[in-house]
Image (tube, rainbow, N blue to C red):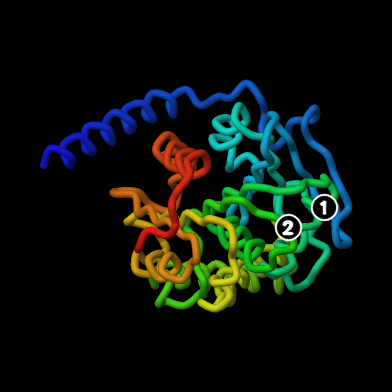
Amino acid sequence: MRYQTKFQIILLLLTLKFCFINAQNNFDIPYGSNESAGKFVKINGAKIYYEEYGKGEPLLLIHGCGADIKSMEYQIDYFKSKYRVIVADSRGQGKSELKTDSLTYSQITKDWEGLVRHLKLDSINILGWSDGGIIGLKMGISRKTRIKKIVAMGANLKPDTTAVNSWAPEKVRRDQAQAKEMLAKGDTSQDWNLEIQLDGLLLNQPNISHSDLKKITASVLIMVGDRDIIKNEHAVEIFNNLPKGQLCIMPGINHGAPRNNPIIFNEIANRFLTEQFDYTQRK
């Protein structure tokens, strides 16, 4: 009871601290539009935009579906004093080119691996949110780069309702139907082709097996909120099939934790990234 009370007090203090900071979240640096830190590089036929901050071990920050560098601003601002933070707009999102009619997680994974090669990074850490978490896992599976640790927030292995709550794909199907209708009408108010492809990612991908997960040699922290799009039991399923996995289900928190609850999220992620853990202990 004493431990539970202590945890509740810590959680309350962190929440109050976040409320104060969130009210003053105007960063001095325009993350995602910072000309002094941003560059373009041609990777796999597409021009990819990325920014770098800080020094030390490389930490890739990978955003979610339909987002961009700015969505990770709380993580950039927190981790740039601890790591060499490398953050990019994934293919077709933000300032990066699409250059495909069939966007896949495998293609985005190859793009990130290409960026690692371009920067000549010997080893990396990864923090990915949603689609970014999926990309992190897929990079760990492919083993094309040397990865020390992966934080995967709100990732899933498959797109069906064994993994995600049913309301999520239902909404995406409605969005995709609307995008197809607008494209057929010739509407140019936004890039409906991109919307259709991004919705297709969520509806039809990924398809990662348990045997795939067992190929990952990096330490992996699986994070979800207990009110996440991703089902709690699916997070446990991922954790149970990782050779070196840790699991964090955050209480009273949803899929938007990196932006909605950055103090709690960043502290948990940082603890995992900095501390050693004995993986010979039984799960």
* Residue 189 visible in the current orientation: no
Element at label 2? loop
Residue at 63% x, 45% y: name it.
Answer: 61
Assess disc 1: are there few (<14), some (14-19) or many (≥20) residues with their C-alpha within 10 Å of its C-alpha: some
Q: Residue at x 81, y 50 (%)?
A: 48
**In the figure, 275 relative to 154: above or below?**
above
Name the side, left or right, on which 43 lies relative to 12. Answer: right
Residue 183 sits in quarter: bottom right
Considering only vertical position in the picture, is 176 above or below 268?
below
Q: Residue at x 40, y 77 (%)?
A: 162
Estimate the x, y position of residue 135 in percent, counting from the top left: 63, 61
Q: Nearer the viewer, residue 280 or 100?
A: 280
Residue position marked by numbered label 2 in the rendering: 145
Lower sequence index among marks 1 and 2: 1
Q: Residues within 10 Å of mark 2 (few under 14, many from 20)?
A: some
Residue 88 visible to an observer of this rendering: yes
Q: Which residue is mark 1?
A: 117
Left-right relation of 272 to 225: right
Q: State yes or no: discs 1 and 2 in contact (Cβ < 8 Å).
A: yes
Viewport quadrant of the N terminus: top left
Would you identify the image quadrant in which residue 193 lies? bottom right
Q: Quadrant of residue 14?
A: top left
Q: Amino acid at mark 2?
A: Thr
Residue 31, given in percent of the width and then of the height, sits at: 66, 33
Horizontal relation, residue 263 to residue 11: left or right: right
- Residue that lies at the very extreme toward the left in this rendered image: 1
Of helix, strand and loop, which one carries label 1?
helix
Position in image of residue 177 (x %, y %): 58, 74
Q: Which of 167/174 is in front?
A: 167
Instruction: Name the foreground residue: 111 vs 148.
Output: 148
Gap between marks 1 and 2, in whole Å?
8 Å
